[in-house]
Image (cartoon, rainbow, N blue to C red):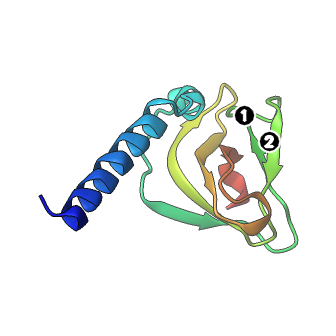
């Protein structure tokens, strides 16, 4: 095998092993948080209101811990939703707004 091909093959194999290792060590926290989902709302975004900063919670209710806030008019990518014991709908998803980019959690659907 030519040296260039050998190096390319080794680089590809190393990358595959590293990516597989990263995927295997990912924490299942988001899977646990989303376990309360009862409605599949995949593949859509919602935007928060202007001059408001909706809280991102660890569970579908105001009593749950706050993980962060959406920016004013910030984008939130919805993965699923549920209604809590009070009948309020909560979205579970990921913040795509700059101040809290990548934070996953629950936001009250009434904000949108």
The label shown at residue 67 is 2
Q: Which residue is painted at 57% across and 30% down in the image?
A: 27
Residue at (72% x, 68% y) in the render: 74
The picture places residue 45, in percent across and down from the top left corner, at 54, 64
For residue 102, which quarter of the picture? bottom right
- Which is nearer the eye, 30 or 86? 30
Q: Residue at x 37, y 50 (%)?
A: 15
Q: Position of residue 42 (x, y in %)?
A: 42, 52
Disc 2 is placed on an element classified as strand
Task: Decide: few, some or many residues near mark 2? Use Cα within 10 Å; few <14, some 14-19, many ≥20.
Answer: some
Distance from Cα at disc 2 to Cα at disc 1: 7 Å
Q: Is residue 44 left or right of residue 94?
A: left
The quadrant holding residue 97 is bottom right
58 w.r.t. 3: above or below: above
Q: Which residue is mark 1?
A: 58
**Quadrant for the N terminus in the image:** bottom left
């Amino acid at each position: 095998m030519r040296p260039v091909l050998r190096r390319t093959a080794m680089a590809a194999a190393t990358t595959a092993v590293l990516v597989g290792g990263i995927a295997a060590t990912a924490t299942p926290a988001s899977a646990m948080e989303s376990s309360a989902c009862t409605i599949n709302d995949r593949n859509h975004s919602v935007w928060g209101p202007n001059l408001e900063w909706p809280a991102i919670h660890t569970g579908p209710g105001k009593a749950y811990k706050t993980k962060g806030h959406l920016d004013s008019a910030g984008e939130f990518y919805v993965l699923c939703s549920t209604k809590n014991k009070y009948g309020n709908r909560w979205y579970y998803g990921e913040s795509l707004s700059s101040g809290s980019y990548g934070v996953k959690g629950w936001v009250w659907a009434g904000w949108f």
